[in-house]
Amino acid sequence: MSASEIESELSADERAGLELIRETGGIHQSDFWKELDVSSRKGSRIAESLEESGVIQREETVYNGHNTYYLEPAPRDLDFSLLMAGDMLSPFIGEEEVDAQADAFSQWMMNLAYEEY
């Protein structure tokens, strides 16, 4: 199941929790439920559900002298196939300016044109 399909099946509370975690880049669970304005029990259930879905990671930690979890977005699988032409990576990657007359660009375009789908 793709990440977008998983996210479409989340409840409204889970989507709000995931959005909060993504916006902050990571948050302690003890702050998470307060920010969502839900009980600590409900916040824990949301975090556990998001972890089981694979959209976040939970790591045990100590925060303000208390045991809690640190919640952060799970790395997403990236699809680099659109940058490829055969076995060549796009010459646009890593370059500030691409010379449309350059051999590397021409060769990449030719590979792209002759690639079989």
Image (cartoon, helix red, strand yellow):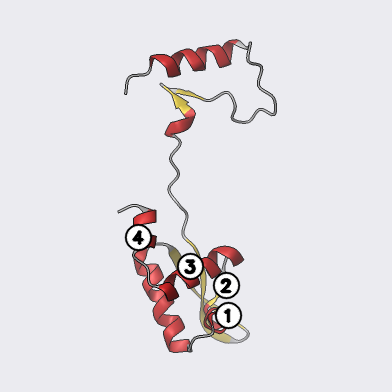
Real-space CA distance between mark 2 and mark 1, rounded to the nearest whole angstrom: 10 Å
Q: Which amino acid type is shown beneath numbered disc 2?
A: Ile
Q: Does the image show residue 79?
A: yes
Camera-nearest residue between 75 and 113: 113
Judging by the rendered image, the residue that carries numbered circle 4 is 6
As measured in the structure, the alpha-carbon distance from the residue carrying label 4 to the one carrying label 2 is 21 Å
Residue that carries the numbered disc 1 in the rendered image: 35
Contact? badges 4 and 2 (CB < 8 Å): no
Q: Earlier in the sequence, mark 3 or mark 1?
A: 3
Q: Is residue 58 visible?
A: no
Which residue is located at x 58 percent, y 10 percent? 103
How far, Cα to Cα, is label 4 from label 3?
12 Å
Dot 3 corresponds to which residue?
18
Provide the secondary structure element on which disc 1 rests: helix
Position in image of residue 76 (x %, y %): 45, 52
From the image, tell me which residue sits under label 2.
27
Q: Amino acid at mark 4?
A: Ile
Q: Earlier in the sequence, mark 2 or mark 3?
A: 3
Separation of disc 1 and disc 4 at Cα? 23 Å
Contact between marks 2 and 3 (CB within 8 A): the answer is: no
Number of other residues with Cα within 10 Å of mark 3, as a class: few under 14, some 14 to 19, many 20 or more: many
Residue 58 lies left or right of residue 95; in this view the side is left
